[in-house]
Structure formats: C-alpha cells, structure tokens
Amino acid sequence: MTSKINRREFLIQTGVMTLGLGVVRASQAFAAPLVVSEVPPRKRPNFLFIMADDHAAHAISTYGSRINKTSNIDRIAMGGARLDHCFCTNAICTPSRAAIMTGQYGHINGVRGWENIDSRRPIQTQKLLQAAGYATGMIGKWHLGRGGNSDPQGFDYWEVMPGQGVYDDPKFYTAAGEKQYPGYATDVTTDLALNWLKEGRDKDKPFYLCVHHKAPHRNWVPSAKYQHLYEDVEIPLPETFDDDYAGRPAAAAAKMRVTRDLTLTDTKGAKPPEGLTEKERRNWFYQTYIKDYLRCVQSVDDSVGHLLDYLEESGLAQDTVVVYTSDQGFFLGDHDWFDKRFFYEETVKMPFLVRYPREIQAGSVRQQFLANVDFAPTILDYAGVTVPPEMQGISGRAMLRGQTPRDWQTTFYYRYWVNGDEHNTAAHYGVRSDTHKLIYFYCKTLGVQGATELNPPVTPYWELYDLRNDPHEMHNIYADAANAEVIGVLKAELSRLQKKYNDEPQH
Ligand code: CA
C-alpha cells in the first residue's frame, strides 16, 4: 500500500468501503418527487410481489434500455424507487427462488443447484406472514420441485406450473390436482392473480401475493398478439457482441453463444438464409433471439399494467408494497450470450423496482447494495414481523425510506455452484465492491445437484475487474502486478464474507 494514503482511504478507493457516498447519491431523484405521506400507516401493508423469469434490467426502460420500452413496469419506479445495485447471490432460477423465500444463501437453505426445496423448513417469508395474520397467495412459476415435501407450503392459495411450465395453454397444479388453461401463460397467470385479489382472498386480512411469471424464460415464445412486434425493426447489437473472451478461459468454455448454441427450438425452426456474410449470419441469430425475448417481455409489461390498475381502481395502491423483480438478470447477446449463471453485471444484477407511497419517495433511485437474500427481511420488516436470526439478509426498509444506516453493506458475496451442466459454466465465487470485482473459478462439482465435469475443462483461476474503467468486464487485470494491493484487500473481504455467511473457500 502506498504510504501517502491510509488504509481507510485505500478501502474507499477499492470500493470495499464507500462511507457516505451511497447515501449522497441515493438522494438523487430522476423524476419530480411527490411529498411522501406523513400519515403513518393505518394498517399493515399488503404485498404484491411480481417476479419475472430471466428479465434483465437492461430490457426495462427505466433502467435505460436501448432496445425496448416497458411503460407499465416503469410506473412502479415513477411512483417509488429503482435500485441500481440489486444482486442475485446465485444467478440461476431455482437457487434464486429459494434464496428469496428463505433469506438464506443456497448452502444454508439446501438449494445450491437443482435440488428441490424442503418446504417443511419454517424460515420462509410466506409462512411467517401467514402466521402473523396475512392472506397468502402464490401463482405462476414455482420451479422448486414438485410433490413430496417440495410443493408450496404456507400459502392459503397456490396454483403453480409444473417445472418450467409452457407458454401456450399452460398447465397449473394445486394440492387438488392439475388443470390446463387455454391461452398464453403470462395472461393466464395474470388472470389467476386478479381472480384471487378480487374474489379469492380473505379481505379481512392484509395480503401477500406472489405473481411469478414464466416469461421471458427460454425458449421465448411470444403471444399471438405480439408475434409481429419489432418485425421491421433492427434491434441494436450489444457493445460486447464480438467479445473474443481473451484472458477469461471460463467465458471461452461456456456454451451459450447466441451465434452458435441456439437450437432450432429456440429459433422456432428458422435457419439463417443462404448466402449471408459471417457478420450478417451473426446478426440474424441476434435479431431472431432478441426479438422473441422482447416480445415475451411485452406481455409481462401488460400484466404489470393490469395488476397496478386493479390496485389503483380498488383503492389499495396506497397501502400495498409493489415489487417488480426477476429471479436474476440475463445476457441479451452481451458477450454473444444468452442464459445467465456468471457473476457478471448483466446477470448478477436483478431489476428491483418498489412502490409504497406511505414510505418511499416517488421517483427515487438508490445505489446502495441489496441482494435477493435481503428481500425476505425487508418484507417482514414492512409487515412488522420479527426477522428470524436464521435469515442471512438484512432489511432494506430504512434504506428505501432514504435513511440508510451508516454501516450499510458495501460489498456483496456471490457463489455459482452448478459446475458444467447444460452451458458448461465453471463453478465460481467472488466479491463485488462499488468499484471492483474479484472472481475465483474453482471448477469443482462438489456433489451439487446438476453439476458435471467441464467439457472442455477449465483450470482454476482468478479474474479481477475495475468496474469504473471496464464496466463490461472485458479486461481481466488479475495478473497485473500493479493490482496486488487491490487483490489483497478484496481477498480479505471475500474471506470475511465467506465466514459471515458460513460458506467455505475451495482450494
Ligand atoms: Ca431464471
């Protein structure tokens, strides 16, 4: 460490410590602020928790999307807060869902990879809310296992899709059996949610409703209504589309390239026309992929509009905490990829928009770190329910109100467990600060459900990124001797976080 700066200043420079900085930036609002109601809540708030599957923040207009508009999803941000640094502790469907429900990392809640949830576990948001007198509902994609002890528990009403579900004429099941609904999955899910809100719930209680869309998960089947959307439009290519993966062997080994690994199912049977140049062929795959993805998003945006309209028309909007999020982000052709899994910005960032007029200033933007394990404590805090010590996350309520505690988390611990698997993604963990990201690809299966040996193999190695100068993480600077001090600080922080969360390093 250079002698001219002290350790505290150095920690601030490496982003491990950001004392005060986040608080200042969080006060910036992007829209005309409304006065936050000073009237204390007369009653406990309702919760409408809307979660899409694989909806990246960079396909939401309030996050600055260059490729689409989401006018209804944006309504939540305009009436509440947008979080720019909300992270998924393990960027893949099933583990993220378990982390959200339990407030725990996967090695604690038992879902590191494709394991089923043990629904008998008592530390689950909906169980605690139900015990506290909430009406609880769960509609849509569950994806935490079926039958045995993995069906939903703690919900007064649940109706969910088997496995990944399907887009057209989807089946749903309850404890009583299975039922097929005519129509498009996103619309059916919305109708089931509205039915429960209007007629199904016990209206003497506050409610907690989870609406979990299948969309826009692979294989990106649009509704008939939107199958021609963007037909005559050229969607701009991502800046990193022509990435050569230099210095990043795990990225090079991954099998999720838009221009190579999409299947005929993904392209709905279409193949690139004969006679294209290589550049045109690559663009054909991108346009084919991204247009179907965005068409699926459009139906999700409609769904959010219908749900918000209901809250407003029924007089519930003031007393309902509305969340819009996704189980993790997604590569939208970034690095020539679809899918997720990597601890890179496009996938580890979750969209997180929250509206609660009684506490959250309309149009606020927050830069503080929040993670999916923090959702459960935050919801319980709003409901006035004690957060169990077994939950590893923290409540974001005060931060969202604009009163961020001085010791707010300024680093984030990530771990992806499913080595190999369908997309040959190396298992890894790491730490992110405000300015840097350190990743260790340890490349081991460790008995995790779904994990396989890598083919092609990857030798364990480290990556380091300076997010200020390299926001797209194209330049692994771990080997640069000038970064030895930064690496030392980040490794110490990684070790601290692993101890904090009761996880173990791999050697
Ligand atoms: Ca997902």
Image (spheres, grey):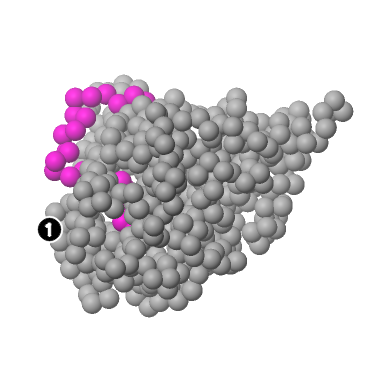
Q: Left or right: 377 with respect to 318?
A: right
Residue 228 magenta = yes
Task: Report the magenta residues as a range.
Answer: 210-237
User: Eyeballing the image, is 209 above or below 301?
Assistant: below
Horizontal and vertical percent for residue 163?
A: 32, 62
- Judging depth in this view, the residue of 101 and 93 nearest the camera is 101
Overall secondary structure of the magenta section: loop
Horizontal and vertical percent for residue 40?
A: 44, 52
Residue 198 magenta = no
Amino acid type, callout 1:
Pro
Q: Residue beneath label 1, please? A: 182
Q: Choose top left, top right, bottom left or bottom right for residue 417.
A: bottom right
Q: Choose top left, top right, bottom left or bottom right for residue 473.
A: top right
Horizontal and vertical percent for residue 503?
A: 65, 60
Q: Choose top left, top right, bottom left or bottom right for residue 352.
A: top left
- Judging depth in this view, the residue of 434 and 462 nearest the camera is 434
Horizontal and vertical percent for residue 428?
A: 59, 50
User: Is the residue marked by circle 1 packed among few (<14), some (14-19), or many (20+) residues within 10 Å?
Assistant: few
- Judging depth in this view, the residue of 41 and 169 nearest the camera is 41
Quarter of the N terminus within the rendering: top right
Classify mark 1: helix, strand or loop: loop
